[in-house]
Image: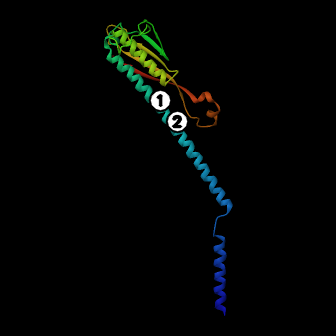
Amino acid sequence: VDRPRRRDRKLHMKHRIAGRIRGFSLLEVLVTILIIAIGFLGLAKTQAAAVSNTQVSRVRAIIALQTGSLASAMHGNREFWGSPGVAPANFSVTGTTIVDTSGTLTVAGVDCVTSICTPAQLALYDVQSWSTNMNNQFPGYSLAAGCSTTTTLPVSCTLKVTWNEKYLAVNRSTSANSASMMANQNYTLFVQP
C-alpha cells in the first residue's frame, strides 16, 4: 500500500512542475517584443545610413566622371587648350553661365555637331555643352578653372568643381540643425592638354 502513494506523489510533483514551466508569462513576451523592436530600429537606421552613403558616393562618382569628360574635351582640342597664350588664364562656370577673363568662352556659340568649327568655337561648344549637362544633374554647382599661360612650359589647367552635398543626420544634434546636413564639397582635377 505504501508503494502506490509514492507513485502518486511523484506523478503529482511532475504535474506541478510541468504546469509551472509549460508556457511564457505575458511580461516575458512583452520584454522580448521590446528587445526585438529596438533591434529593428537600429537595423532601420543602419539601412538609412547605407542608402545615404550610397547616394553621396553616386554623386561624387558622377562629378568625377563629368569633370573627366571636360578634361577629355580639352585633350581633344589641343590646338586651343594646349597652345600657350590661346586658352583663357581663368574661367568659371556657375549653372550655365560662363565667365571668361579673355572673352573667348563667353561669345555666342556655334553648334559644332552640324557646322565646322574653329578650335576656339569648339572649346566654347564643349564648355557650354558640359555646363548644360552639369546644371541638369547638379543645379547649384560651380567650376573654377585656371590654365597656365607661360609660353615656355606646357599648358596645364586645374579644374575645381564645387557643389552642395546632403547627408543623413546621425544624432539628435545634427538632425535638429538642418543647415549641418549640407556640406560644401569640391573635386579638383589637374589637366595637361
Kindly identify the amino acid type of the residue bearing the numbered disc 1.
Val
Q: Position of residue 55 (x, y in %)?
A: 49, 33
Q: Relative to 2, is 88 on the left or the right?
A: left
Q: Quadrant of the N terminus?
A: bottom right
Residue 27, compared with residue 181, is above or below; it is below
Check disc 1 and report the residue beneath it: 59
Q: Residue 150: image x %, image y %?
A: 35, 8
Q: Residue at x 49, y 24 (%)?
A: 138
Looking at this view, name the residue that lies furthest to the bottom.
1
Left/right placement of residue 177 relative to residue 115 reads right
Q: Nearer the viewer, residue 21 or 112?
A: 112
Tell me residue 105's x, y (percent). 42, 10
Q: Residue at x 65, y 89 (%)?
A: 4
| Residue 169, percent from left and from top | 59, 35
| Residue that badge 2 annotates | 52
Q: Is residue 22 above or below residue 126?
A: below
Q: Is residue 79 visible?
A: yes
Whether residue 92 is situated above or below residue 44 in the rendered picture: above
Q: Quadrant of residue 10?
A: bottom right
Residue 192 shows in this picture: no
* Location of residue 99 with respect to 21 vertically, above or below: above
